[in-house]
Amino acid sequence: MEKELIYGIIGCGSFGNIHMTALKDVEGIKVTALCDAHIENAEEANKKYKYNAKCYSDFNVMLDENKFDVVLVATADHVHKDATVKALKSGANVLCEKPMALKLEECKEMLQAEKESGKLLMVGQICRYTPAFVKAKEIIEGGLIGDLYFVESEYAHDYSMIPGTDNWRMHPDRHPIIGGGCHAIDLLRWIAGNPSEVTAYSNNKVLTDWPISDTTIAIMKFPNGVIGKVFTSIGCKRNYTMRSVFYGTKGTIICDNTSQSLTLHMEKSSQHGSFADGFFGTGSERNIPHPIAVGVNNHNAQAEHMAMKEAILEGKPLLTTGREGANTVAVCVAVVESAKKGLPVEVDYNF
Ligand SMILES: NC(=O)c1ccc[n+]([C@@H]2O[C@H](COP(=O)([O-])OP(=O)(O)OC[C@H]3O[C@@H](n4cnc5c(N)ncnc54)[C@H](O)[C@@H]3O)[C@@H](O)[C@H]2O)c1
């Protein structure tokens, strides 16, 4: 029989609950302890998911009193570092929610703890499990759209009614480009590699009572001369989206994480045309859009837990490692610095 993985969960708020719902569909998982600073959240989840787990309000006590194969850290972002380091030191593998941390020094400490513990650290950069983005990457790697030259992604999410428990999303250290924009940045890094330099601008015109810029635009230099753009808005008055476009020399992919298809635009033929015969009239005669059906699963937490399980039990490599999470934070931090200085900033990956 397959080994059962013993889980402890720290943070039983809304995303903790997304994970707990996803875990119902992963075989061989047993949740034995739950922790939340508001212990009633842990107790409520314990009842809802029928865990019969021990409930704690302090993760230090939970980690001192129990042994886990996996600890899920789904707390407010500023708690990720302390909870992850303690969990790794206690001998558990850790799935830590994104962003890995709000500061590079914290990421460094987490990577050190991972190294010293010999355990696995996975960061919840969940877009790498979103069906549309997985398909887009597959098409790009298959060479169908030729060589990439421009990539863009956005994180547009109205946070006005979701400041988080005790308003943690409103903390000045929780710059939206780190907290939410990390999804778009991680997606572009996964597709196009590590950007070397960023230039960014931010403003605060919508959530004017929040002490942080609600909107940021960043342009970036990627390897092989590819250029890119990331837009983040947490005040936008529109439905949530991560609309992303990947431009290649032979085609273009337009996709997002909430639609049932992506669109692949390919050249119709290599014949030359003219404006007179309408060849370039709308562009649609020249470049044909092909819709490709994809599943909609913008929070594919089940795939994350499956990946963690396969890594522990079968030694399969993790896709969203601690190092990957840290590199994404490195880009986010450079974007914040550039927006502050009004100057281009080189991304520091040497930590
Ligand atoms: N992967 C994604 O797409 C995605 C989506 C939403 C949120 N998140 C991430 O998930 C995490 C949780 O977000 P949320 O939306 O559930 O927020 P939330 O406010 O609903 O839940 C956070 C929970 O953490 C608890 N908490 C805070 N400090 C704690 C501590 N020291 N010890 C134990 N518990 C503590 C709070 O009481 C709360 O119940 C964040 O890191 C967020 O960035 C990820």
Image (cartoon, grey):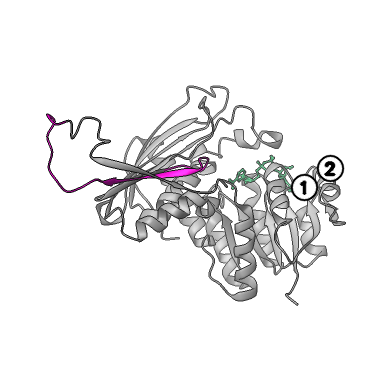
**Magenta extent:** 255-277
Label 1 within 8 A of ligand 1 by Cβ: yes
Q: Looking at the image, is 32 positioned above or below residue 277?
A: below
* Residue at left offset 63%, top offset 51%: 80
In which of the image's four quarters is ligand 1 placed?
top right
* Residue at left offset 53%, top offset 22%: 208
Which residue is nearer to you in this view: 148 or 325? 148
Numbered disc 2: secondary structure:
helix
The amino acid type, in three-letter code, at marker 2 is Glu
Q: Which mark is residue 36?
A: 1
Disc 2 residue crowd, few under 14, some 14–19, many 20+, Cα 10 Å: some
Disc 1 residue crowd, few under 14, some 14–19, many 20+, Cα 10 Å: many
Magenta region includes residue 271: yes
Residue 79 percent coordinates (x, y): 66, 48
Which residue is nearer to you in this view: 332 or 128? 128
Residue 275 percent coordinates (x, y): 13, 30
Magenta region includes residue 104: no
Residue 319 as seen in the image, left or right of residue 337: right
Q: Do the residues labelled 1 and 2 touch (CB within 8 Å)?
A: yes
Residue picked out by circle 2? 40
Quadrant of the rendering where the C terminus is positioned: bottom left
Residue 338 as seen in the image, left or right of residue 29: left
Numbered disc 1: secondary structure:
loop
Which residue is nearer to you in this view: 198 or 106? 198
